[in-house]
Image: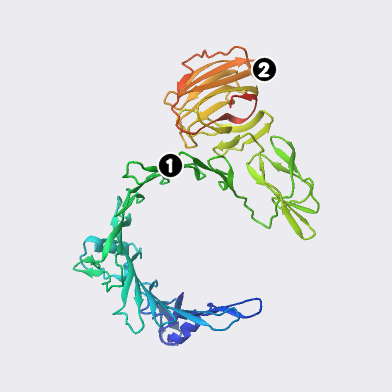
Amino acid sequence: MSVYTPYLYYPYTTSGLDNYINNGKLIAEKYYNQANQLQKETQYTYYTPNVGNPILTGYRWFSLSSCYSPIFSVSRFERYIARSLLYEKSEITYQPDGTNPITRVTRYAYGQNHQQPIKTSLNKSNGDSLVYLTKYVKDYALNGMLSGDALYLKQLNDRNINATIENLSFLKKSGETDATMKAIAGQLMLYGIYGDVDNLKPKQLLNLETNQPIAVSKSQIISSNLAYDSHYKPRINYSHNSFGLISEQWPQKGLKNTYGYTAKGQMSQSVSAGNSSNPQTTSYQYLDFFGLNKITDPSQRDQRFYYDKLGRLSYATDPNGKVTETYDYHYDQLAAPNARSIVSSSLRAATLQATGSTGTITRTGGNTGGSLTVPTELEQNHNDTCNYNGCSSQSATVRIPDINNNWLSHTFGSSVACTEQISNAFTLRGSGAIFNLSPDTYHWAYKEMTGDFSLIVKIANIPAVDGQRSGIVIRQDFQNNSPFYTLFQDGNAHIGAIASESSPFLGYNSAALNTTWLKLVKVGNTLTGYFGQSSTNTPPTTWDNNYTGGSITYNLPLTGTYYLGLAVWGSNNTTTFNNISGI
């Protein structure tokens, strides 16, 4: 806090400042058992360090009226910075019956150039003490011409980065002084610059190597450089990229770990034992505007993360597709479900009906009652709580939109979109565009895939408007500009294909609306698109892959898991797909 005191009329007093600063501080805690017997208490003592010199001096001028001439008076003010710091913590523990107290006292001392603890003393009942000494950047004499590690300390200090440099642990035997106590452990961190001059990062961690308590010299600046005890030995080395992100970490006696990053600074892979003949690689994949999407372990097993439309983590699955974590977000006093089933649904809403429950049903969002109609434009989770005679029970979570058989839905971009699945049919609504290497904006229902497939689907209902496009999309991942291929129908009664390359349009042909079927076959990295006509629910007997403007067969290298689904784009395009088979 800041203390303002008139220089002449209200002199500063330490006792008055202590009383003011420490007002409202926690000074004691006591814990009792059920028999009201004291089991533990903690007492806290604070102090206000020497305030020192004022950091701001100001003057106020007063003009007093006079019959003959103006008279001026000057009042001087000084501004000080003060802070209450913990000096001592006494912990007293008792036997279960509240007798035989054992006291343990911890005392703290602070740096003169900062207010971080530089000494912590833990007094033991036998008279011995454990003493922990810490040196921060501001505890070193960083004046004059410096070099080596001392220069990096000065640069940290110039940037007001008061990093921890040295930690020492001592066993102080009864009767010993601080000067004679012996060290039992210690660490020292050295810094370096990587890339930009402001990227001051750790470069090496040193450990105090000793099998018994020893006398040590604390690190200090000697002859313009950092000097430290000879018992310190390198333990871990670090390397960073030009953006200051750690790229390598390897122990002095061990194997190296290396790290890779995306252009946005997100970790893309970590390689354990990178200098061995059998490195173990873990990779990380992200969704734009959301977060971590997939972690692939060294055995190529995927852990996945899914988000709602607000970018909040919704649930996670293990490599077997089993949900391991779910997250619901409540912003007021909400309850959860007892029993529920979806009794009807549409593109705009779904009605949830509670069954088999007695009592007051409180639903997600604070609604009550046996049924609830919810919008399906946004993906969301719903659950209820049933309260009856003082007891409550929770239902399972229902995910809206309700799609199954391992289908998922996702929207690229910010357009309002929704998904409806009824049996083996999807009705999708969305807006956007898929073209060339631009960021994708569309809505789709998809599955995670590996290997080859032969997907068949009928476009049963598509708006007869030029630019409204619906069809099959396959892509490597959810990153912008991910390698992709799409076979689609346009509302102008044409079939087309687009891929992620500089000349993306692969070909087109005419095809009647609402009777066109699409077929996409993947063999290895080769994709071949077909179309056919059938007004019934029976697939065409013949398929055509003759297109004007280029070849419809396309080579799309895909690795590991990829994504395949049905998509819509254009302007508020609502399309129904049915008779889906092959995946």
Q: Nearer the viewer, residue 292 or 154?
A: 292
Q: Position of residue 523 (x, y in %)?
A: 48, 22
Rendered view: 387 above or below 527: below
Instruction: Give, as a three-letter code, the residue at label 2.
Output: Thr
Disc sitting over residue 538 in the figure: 2
Residue 240 shown left or right of residue 425 in the figure? left
Rendered view: 125 above or below 458: below
Residue 67 shown left or right of residue 235 in the figure? right
| Mark positioned earlier in the residue sequence (1 or 2) | 1
User: Can residue 268 be seen by looking at this rendering?
Assistant: yes
Q: Position of residue 517 (x, y in %)?
A: 61, 19
User: Can residue 309 be seen by looking at this rendering?
Assistant: no
Spatial distance from mark 1 to mark 2, Cα to Cα? 44 Å
**How many C-alpha atoms fall within 10 Å of the one at disc 1: few (<14), some, or many (≥20)?**
some
Q: Nearer the viewer, mark 1 or mark 2?
A: 1
Residue 426 in which image quadrant: top right
Q: Which residue is mark 1?
A: 298
* Contact check, label 1 and label 2, Cβ < 8 Å: no
Q: Position of residue 370 (x, y in %)?
A: 79, 47
Question: What residue is at 50 percent from the left and 83 percent from the top?
Answer: 19
Q: Position of residue 277 (x, y in %)?
A: 32, 41
Q: Nearer the viewer, residue 325 or 535?
A: 325
**How many C-alpha atoms fall within 10 Å of the one at disc 2: few (<14), some, or many (≥20)?**
few
Residue 96 shown left or right of residue 63 in the figure? right
Question: What residue is at 40 percent from the left and 83 percent from the top?
Answer: 127
> The C terminus is located in which quarter?
top right
Residue 377 in which image quadrant: top right
Q: Is the image coloured rainbow, by chain, by secondary structure, or in one colour?
A: rainbow
Question: What residue is at 67 percent from the left and 28 percent from the top?
Answer: 424
Residue 98 in which image quadrant: bottom right
Instruction: Give, as a three-letter code, the residue at label 1.
Output: Pro
